Image: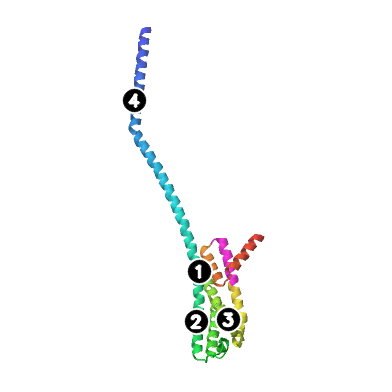
């Protein structure tokens, strides 16, 4: 019985060892078979990660450049728009002056020439009245700033308008009042739009203030106010 038990244990150990060796061979065979593919896939994934990181950096760089170009274009467009408005006003005045100069003897100064031509006075009077009426009914801030800009240009280019009785109140009181109102509205809208992060309102406020030549002053006031707070 003892001998039989010894034979059974030895046979059992042999079988266990045989099974272990068989399993080990299968594992080694499987690893050897798939190892190159696993290494290749790992390398491919690493390369993809590097390419994706490089593309992300390039896209971020291009996005920054596009934003810079957009800001530069917007600023230059606003300057060009303001300059174009002033040139249109000056060109209209030039045409009027040329027509008046052709019908008047050479030698009169421009101011005397204006005073002797009722048609020129009437034109400016009607234009100022038209602009002041439109200002009272127009809500769009940029358009209002352009109207104020034209009114101020007319009164600055033709100082003698205030000597005309029917124009005195318009030049000395109405135009300054409307200009102050539009400047206050533009400054108030700029402040509220910055607080609400509304890009369209910020853009229109900046355009209006630039038309009124008040942008730098307004921004300086805001900066001083924030500094005091």
- What residue is disc 2 on? 92
- What residue is disc 4 on? 25
Q: Position of residue 194 (x, y in %)?
A: 56, 62
| Pick the front one: 3 or 37 | 37
Q: Position of residue 31 (x, y in %)?
A: 35, 31
User: Of tags 2 and 4, which is closer to the observer?
Assistant: 2
Q: Can you say whether 33 is above or below 163 in the image?
A: above
Q: Which comes sooner in the sequence, label 1 or label 2?
A: 1
The magenta stretch spans residue 193: yes
Left-right relation of 46 to 221: left
Q: Which residues are magenta?
A: 183-197
Q: Residues within 10 Å of mark 4 (few under 14, many from 20)?
A: few
User: Of tags 4 and 3, which is closer to the observer?
Assistant: 3
Residue contact at pointers 1 and 3, CB within 8 angstroms: no
Give the spatial CA distance, label 1 vs label 2.
21 Å
State whether the magenta stretch is mostly helix, strand or loop: helix
Q: In which quadrant is the N terminus drawn?
A: top left
Q: Which comes sooner in the sequence, label 2 or label 4?
A: 4
Q: Which comes sooner in the sequence, label 3 or label 2?
A: 2
The magenta stretch spans residue 127: no
């Amino acid at each position: 019985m003892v001998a039989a038990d010894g034979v059974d244990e030895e046979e059992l150990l042999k079988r266990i060892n045989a099974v272990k060796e068989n399993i080990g061979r299968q594992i080694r065979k499987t690893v050897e078979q798939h190892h190159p593919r696993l290494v290749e896939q790992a390398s491919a994934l690493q390369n993809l990660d590097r390419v994706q990181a490089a593309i992300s950096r390039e896209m971020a760089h291009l996005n920054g450049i596009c934003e810079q170009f957009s800001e530069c274009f917007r600023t230059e467009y606003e300057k060009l728009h303001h300059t174009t408005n002033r040139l249109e006003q000056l060109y209209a005045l030039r045409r009027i002056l040329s027509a008046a100069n052709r019908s008047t003897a050479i030698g009169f100064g421009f101011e005397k020439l204006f005073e002797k031509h009722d048609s020129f006075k009437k034109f400016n009077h009607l234009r100022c009245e038209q602009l002041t009426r439109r200002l009272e009914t127009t809500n769009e801030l940029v358009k209002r700033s352009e109207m104020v800009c034209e009114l101020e240009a007319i009164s600055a280019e033709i100082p003698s308008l205030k000597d005309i009785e029917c124009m005195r109140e318009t030049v000395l009181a109405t135009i300054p009042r409307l200009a102050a109102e539009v400047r206050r509205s533009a400054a108030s809208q700029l402040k509220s739009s910055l607080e609400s992060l509304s890009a369209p309102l910020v853009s229109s406020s900046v355009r209006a203030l630039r038309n009124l030549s008040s942008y730098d002053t307004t921004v300086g006031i805001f900066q001083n106010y924030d500094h005091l707070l």
